[in-house]
Amino acid sequence: MFERNHTPELLAPAGGRAQLEAAVRFGADAVYFACDRFGLRQRAENFALDEVPSAVACAHASGARAYVALNTLMDADDVAALPAYLEAFDAAGADALIVSDLGALSLARKHAPSLELHVSTQAGVMNAEAARMWHELGAGRVVCAREMSVADIARLRADAPRDLEIEAFVHGAMCMAVSGRCLISSVMTGRSGNKGHCAQPCRWSYALVEERRPGEFYPVEEDVRGAYVMNARDLNMIAHLDDLIEAGVDSLKIEGRNKKAFYVATAVHAYRSVLDGADVSEAAAELDAISHRPYSTGFYYGRAEQSPERDGYVRKFVHAATVERAGARVVVVCHNRFREGDELEVLSPRRPVARVRVRNLAWLPASAPDDPSDATPVPVAVANRSAERYSFEVHAALAPGDYLRARVG
C-alpha cells in the first residue's frame, strides 16, 4: 500500500460491449469507447449510434462514467456529420467527449452542451499554457502527451488551472510517433492512422540497403528477417502509480480498444487491486499473464525504450474459459484448449487470483443451447471446441463471468 493525496479515476477501454461489461465488472471507474465514426481505433468492434444509449446505461448501472472518443483529425465531411452524432451522445447521457480537433470542440459546445470536454493525447498538450488555453475554450480535462515525464506532469499540474483535470496513460501499446500523430501508415499503405485505420508499419521488420549496392541488405540488428527499428515497447506503470498520483494525475488510463474482454478484465483487475491497496508484485504478475510486448515505463523516467530485436508478444497464459454457471459442477464456455487435471487460474472481480483443478471434465452438446444443464454430459479428456460449453467439478467459489486462464505450454 502507498500513501496518496487523492484516489484517481481508473479509466478502461471498451472496444465493444463485452469489453465494456468486463471493464465495469472488474472495477473501472470510467470507460471510453467510440462510435462507428470519429474514433482512432476503427478496427475495434465499436458501437453503432443507436447502441450508445445502452452502452452508457450499462456503465452508469455499475456506477461508472462513460466517455465517447471523437479524437480523429476532422476533415470537412467529418465536421458536417458531427452535429447529429453530438446530439445523440448528449441525449444518451454520456458524461464526456474526448476531442483533439478545435472544430469538434466548438461543435460539441453547441450540440452537446451538457457533456464535459476532454482533450485527447492527440492534441499533444505538454505545458500549462496549452492546458490553460484548452480550459478557456471549455475543456475540463487534458490527456497528457505520451512524451511527458512524471516531472513534466507535476510541473503542468502546478501551473495549470486547479479545476482542470489531468489524465495520463498507465498501460498498453505505445506509438513511436509524437502522441500518435503519425503519417507512416498513410504514406506506405493508404490507411491513415489519424483517421483510425493504422496498419502499424512501425511494427514491421526493416533492413538497410546502401544506394550504390542494390540488393545488398544490411540488418540494423541481428535478425535474419530484418530489424524492428520503430517497434515501441508496451507501457506498464503498475509499480509507479504513487509517482503519478503525487504528480497530480486525476485519471489513470489503460490503452486497448482493440483488445479482447479478457485483456481488459485482467488489466483493470490488476490496477484496481493496487489502487485498493493490494501488493504491487502480485498485480505485476497478473499483467505478465496477458499477451503483451516487452514492458517499459515509456517516457515517464527518461527516453522510451524500443524492441528493435523482435516483434510479437510475450504470452504466459491464455484465456481458457469463461464461467457461465456456478456451482459444485461449473459450466463454462471454452475459448482455448484445457485438459482434465489442469490447474486453471481464476480471475474474479476484487478478489485475489485463485486456482482450481479440472476434475471430471465433460462436453455439453449443443442440443440444449438455452439450458446446458439439460444436455447429457459427454466425458472427455480435453476441452478443445471453441465457444462450446463444458462442465467440470470444482472445490472453490466461482461466479458467472469469472475468467479461467491456462498457462501456455
Image (spheres, helix red, strand yellow):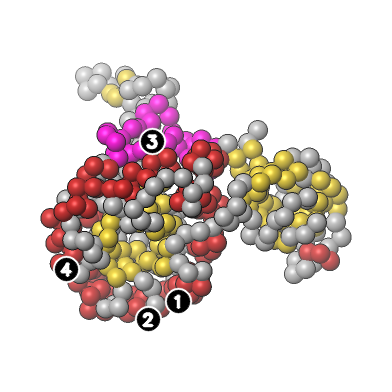
In whole angstroms, how far apart are the C-alphas of marks 4 and 2? 22 Å
Which badge, 3 or 2, is on the more N-terminal residue? Answer: 2
Helix, strand or loop at label 3? It is strand
Residue 39, label in figure: none
From the image, tell me which residue sits under label 4: 137
Check the image and report above or below for 103 versus 188: below
Q: Amino acid at mark 2?
A: Ala
Residue 53, label in figure: 1
**Is disc 4 in contact with disc 2, using a CB cutoff of under 8 Å?**
no
**Is disc 1 in contact with disc 2, using a CB cutoff of under 8 Å?**
yes
Residue 197 screen position, x and y as percent: 36, 54
Helix, strand or loop at label 4? It is loop
Which badge, 1 or 2, is on the more N-terminal residue? Answer: 1
Q: What range is drawn magenta here? A: 290-315
In whole angstroms, how far apart are the C-alphas of marks 3 and 2? 41 Å
From the image, tell me which residue sits under label 2: 91
Residue 252 screen position, x and y as percent: 37, 53
Foreground of the two, 58 or 52: 58
Residue 296, label in figure: 3
